[in-house]
Every structure is written in structure tokens, then in C-alpha cells.
Image: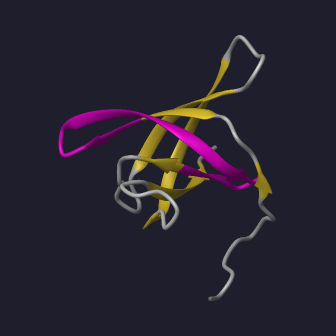
Amino acid sequence: MIERRRDPRFPFACTVRAASSAEGRSANSCCASVNISEGGICIVSDRSAEAGSVVSARLHLDDVPVSVPLLLQVQWVASDDRRAGKFRTGLRFLF
């Protein structure tokens, strides 16, 4: 497998609440982060997403009373081999 990441990834676990719009419908889901880098974040979700789609999300950090708003673009989606019915999604930060 060819490594295509520009930035090193670091383990990072927190709750991510994501909202996406596809074909005129919006969908919200509660996800868990897996790792993070300067360029993006990997999450695990029970919903698949389309590569290239834009997702708004909020990062909920432990012991912090506010969430961090994010605007992300889906880079890739893969079935999670460790969790049936779950998807790992690579998201790029859009700034």
C-alpha cells in the first residue's frame, strides 16, 4: 500500500458530531475519532459518505464545555474490519 498522507497521524479519541447534505437530504451522525493530523482527521461512523462531499462537524473535547466547529471534505471511506456495520472515513480540514 502506498502512503499518501502529507502529515503524520496521531492517535486521538473524541466524539465528533457530523452533518452532511446529499441529494437534498441532511443526515446527522455521532462518530468517534481515530486519529488526527494537521491536514485532517479519521473517524468511525455507522454511515458511509461519498468521496468529495463536504461535511460540517463539531469536535467535542473531554472536559471542555464548548465544541470546535469544523468544515471537512471526505477523502476516502472504507468498511471497518474491526467493527461490523461501521465505516472509517478520512476527512480533510477545509480552511
**Picture coordinates of residue 25, whole percent (x, y):** 20, 36
Instruction: Specify the farthest residue to the left.
Output: 24
Q: Which residues are magenta?
A: 19-43
Residue at horizontal 38%, vertical 53%?
53
Colour logic:
secondary structure
**Picture coordinates of residue 92, whole percent (x, y):** 59, 55
- The answer to which of 44 and 95 lies nearer the viewer is 44
What kind of secondary structure does the magenta stretch mostly adopt? strand
Instruction: Specify the farthest residue to the top.
Output: 65
Residue at horizontal 80%, vertical 55%?
10
Q: Is residue 82 above or below residue 47?
A: below
- The answer to which of 54 and 62 lies nearer the viewer is 62
Q: Is residue 10 magenta?
A: no
Residue at horizontal 49%, vertical 52%?
73
Left or right, 4 with respect to 30, comes to right
Left or right, 29 with respect to 65, comes to left
**Picture coordinates of residue 52, whole percent (x, y):** 41, 60
Which quadrant of the figure has residue 60?
top right
Q: Quadrant of the N terminus?
A: bottom right
**Picture coordinates of residue 27, whole percent (x, y):** 30, 35
Q: Is residue 32 magenta?
A: yes
Question: How many numbered circles does the render carry?
Answer: 0
Residue at horizontal 40%, vertical 63%?
51
Left or right, 37 with respect to 74, comes to right
Q: Quadrant of the C terminus?
A: top right
Which quadrant of the figure has residue 24?
top left
